[in-house]
Amino acid sequence: MSREWTIKSALIAIAAVLMILGGAPLYKHRHYEVPVVAGPGVTSVIKLSEFVPSLKGSMADADVFVLEGKEPGGKVLVMANTHANEPAGLLTAVIMIENAVVEKGTLMVIPEFNASAGRNTRPGDGYPLYYDIPTEWGAKRFRMGNRDTSPLDQWPDPDVYIHYPDKQLLSFIDVRNTNRTWPGRPNGPLMEKVTFAAMEMMRKDRLNIAIDMHGAETMFPVTNCIVAPQKSAKIATLVSMTVKAMEGFDNHVEPSPPNFHGLSHREIGDFSDTLPFLLEAPIPFLDQPTGPKTVKLLLDGKDPFLLSLSKKKKLFVPYDENGWPIEKRVGQHCSVALEIIRQYSKKNPDTAIRISGIPRYADLVKNGVGRYFHDPAKAEKKSVYYE
């Protein structure tokens, strides 16, 4: 009996050690803080919990950076990391926070809209925990997140997610997907509270534009595009034509399906006066038939299997030996967002928005993403926020 107990105790001890060794990197990832330097245009930083108080103190309470111009005008909201495994949006949002100056109107930026998903990961799929962006002052490290919020913050999942308020039946996992829980409700699951808080901000502050930045697979037809409902379609079409003619990249328009509920580009427009736009940039990393899910693939978008599929015309975007580097993806988000604001302002001069300091597509392709990040070590402590 003594020998048997000794063996059991040894096995328990080994299991405990393995759990600690396996769990420590995930714990460190969940609590890793990404420094963001509030640039010269940031006038205040608020929380989503100001609109839904029950979010306060949770991993889902997100920072909202407010950049208010001296001259009154329209208001635009930019959201990133709705899906935290699509990093181009987050990098674009940080560039805006650290560089934008608003001359007329107000810009509001949420870099980690699904803040919990930004602290989640998919180790079973071989996702890297972090990725580094080279800068003039060293590497800036970001967490690689997941599409859905962490079960540590919202659990259990239902067998079927019944979307509010239309009662459409969705996959159980969609209850943790902040692009399936719009327009949300204040007493619903955590992600419904997040989307409801954003809706309340749009309604109470009378925001004119909402831009939700994403990334989609090269094998998925809704990629490299602007998704817009009917009320936003005219501006989206003008933006698509302008960036192609003036900046040399394609970005077509996809209509928001009226009967598919829960998505930002559908529900924001239906439940507020705000004009919604969802931006999709190609991200080869998310395609299934690729090599290992490495940081290199995440950042340069080069994969031999996708190249082979491209030659067989199986992809929905142009794809060659140059891949789809992060500079192009972030550049497209910057230019498309700026062009949406410009086209809206032309049609609505009374609520126009003027912003400077944000690089466009050609600038990002030439200079790289890291060129536009500021060194937090050299910034005033009160200007550094941790996401």
Image: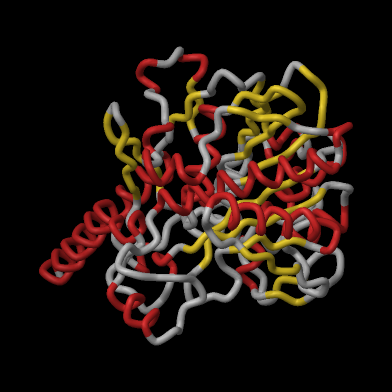
Q: Residue furthest front?
A: 245
Q: How was the colour assigned to the protein in this rendering?
A: secondary structure
In the depicted view, which residue is nearer to us: 280 or 90? 280
Q: What residue sits 33% from the left and 76% below the top?
A: 307
Q: Residue furthest bottom?
A: 312
In the depicted view, which residue is nearer to us: 334 or 50? 334
Residue 157: image location, x then y, percent: 62, 67
Q: Residue furthest left?
A: 3
Tell how many labels. 0
In the depicted view, which residue is nearer to us: 379 or 251? 251
Q: What residue sits 65% from the left and 75% below the top?
A: 171
In the depicted view, which residue is nearer to us: 53 or 229? 229
Q: Is residue 325 left or right of residue 197?
A: left
Residue 335: image location, x then y, percent: 58, 46
Residue 269: image location, x then y, percent: 83, 55
65 over 343 or under it: above or below: above
Q: What residue sits 48% from the left and 48% below the top?
A: 330
Which of the image's four quarters has the N terminus?
A: bottom left
Residue 242: image location, x then y, percent: 65, 53
Q: What residue sits 47% from the left and 48% below the top?
A: 119
Q: Is residue 311 left or right of residue 53?
A: left
Q: Quadrant of residue 35?
A: top left
